[in-house]
Image (spheres, rainbow, N blue to C red):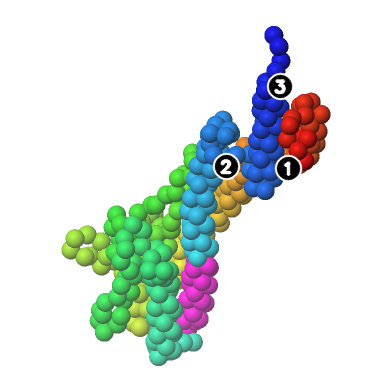
């Protein structure tokens, strides 16, 4: 078969076009840092990139949820610490009131001081952050309300399925309690005459009829106002029972905070790993790209030189 000048020209032009396309691709990769701009340019890595980015979005959502719950538990930790300090202050005042040297007016003054502490504790139980009541369970209303009884203001909460609701956070296969409710905060158990029964630091209401159950702090105030010194020893025992209960809640809060931090660390590590996978699937190897680009530019120059030497002169060459 005879190789014509036209055939040689077509082959040379085709080879040069191929080199130019490779140079264009390498220049695009060098400027963008990506292997491809369109999925059709690298379908397999494009699919991997889409899948990896979907995982990163899930990790971002998990992180946001974890941060929200983590912030809540930091708040729970802070508030339970304040309540514990307030209860210990009440304990000291009751010990002082139990001293036989105190007069009825002295105990009435102590009762007034404990009423103020009770108000502070109730306000802590009704803490609102960005429109959300921290201890309201699944309810959107303020968990702590007040009423006037016998000329005194009593702070109370409603004990029902909403305020005692246990909320949870699902992260993959891990499920965590994500809240501390008002019942956790104020309820405790005490033993009276050998029988264990539920009690509360502040008063609470149950049932459709709104039955009021007097809380420990209101009972202490009443005992002091009535100068009922004999009841103060049992009140001190009940305060100790509540402190023990709140300590367990605080311990659980601390354990949950550790679990949340561990999940946050795992999330961050996984995010870093998947980001590296995205870079591997989508990102160009810049060392190789630049090396190949230099090689292809050399090939291009060589192709031009070879074509100049291979093609026979035409009439146009002589007309220069």
Q: What stretch is highlighted in magenta?
A: 77-100
Circle 3 is placed at which residue position?
Answer: 5
Depicted 6 relative to depicted 163: above or below? above
What element does badge 3 sit on? helix
Q: Distance between the residues labelled 3 and 1?
A: 40 Å
Mark 3 Cα within 10 Å, few/some/many (few <14, many 20+)? few
Depicted 54 relative to depicted 159: above or below? above
Q: Position of residue 255 (x, y in %)?
A: 56, 52
Q: How far apart are marks 3 and 2 (CA)?
A: 39 Å
Q: Which residue is drawn at 50% across and 42% down?
A: 54
Mark 2 Cα within 10 Å, few/some/many (few <14, many 20+)? few
Mark 1 Cα within 10 Å, few/some/many (few <14, many 20+)? some
Q: Main secondary structure of the magenta part?
A: helix
Give whichever of 194, 221 is nearer the camera: 221
* Between discs 3 and 1, the one toward the N terminus: 3
Circle 2 is placed at which residue position?
Answer: 37
Q: Residue 276, which numbered label?
A: none
Quadrant where the N terminus is found in the figure: top right
Q: Distance between the residues labelled 1 and 2?
A: 16 Å
* Between discs 3 and 2, the one toward the N terminus: 3
Circle 1 is placed at which residue position?
Answer: 286
Give whichever of 5, 78 is nearer the camera: 5
* Between discs 1 and 2, the one toward the N terminus: 2
Q: Residue at x 48, y 61 (%)?
A: 72
């Amino acid at each position: 078969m005879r190789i014509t000048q036209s055939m040689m020209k077509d082959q040379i032009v085709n080879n040069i076009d191929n080199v130019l396309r490779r140079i264009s691709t390498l220049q695009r990769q060098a400027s963008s840092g990506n292997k491809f701009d369109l999925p059709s340019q690298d379908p397999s890595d494009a699919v991997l990139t889409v899948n990896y980015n979907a995982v990163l979005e899930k990790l971002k959502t998990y992180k946001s949820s974890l941060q929200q719950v983590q912030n809540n538990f930091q708040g729970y930790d802070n508030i339970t610490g304040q309540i514990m300090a307030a209860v210990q202050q009440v304990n000291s005042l009751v010990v002082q009131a139990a001293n036989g040297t105190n007069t009825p007016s002295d105990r009435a003054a102590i009762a007034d001081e404990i009423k103020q502490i009770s108000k502070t504790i109730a306000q802590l139980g009704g803490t609102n952050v960005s429109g959300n009541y921290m201890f309201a369970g699944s309810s959107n209303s303020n968990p702590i309300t007040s009423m006037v009884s016998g000329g005194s203001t009593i702070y109370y909460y409603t004990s029902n399925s909403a305020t005692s609701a246990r909320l949870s956070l699902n992260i993959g296969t891990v499920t965590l309690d994500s809240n501390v409710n008002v019942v956790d905060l104020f309820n405790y158990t005490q033993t009276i005459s050998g029988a264990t029964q539920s009690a509360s630091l502040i008063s609470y209401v149950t049932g459709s009829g709104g039955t009021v159950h007097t809380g420990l702090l209101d009972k202490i105030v009443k005992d002091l106002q009535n100068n009922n010194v004999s009841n103060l020893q049992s009140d001190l025992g009940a305060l100790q029972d509540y402190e023990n209960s709140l300590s367990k809640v605080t311990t659980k809060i601390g354990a949950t905070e550790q679990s949340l931090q561990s999940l946050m660390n795992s999330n961050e590590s996984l995010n870093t790993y998947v980001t590296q996978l995205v870079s591997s699937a989508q990102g160009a190897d810049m060392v190789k790209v630049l090396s190949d680009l230099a090689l292809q530019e050399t090939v291009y120059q060589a192709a031009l030189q070879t074509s100049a030497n291979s093609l026979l002169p035409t009439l146009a060459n002589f007309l220069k």
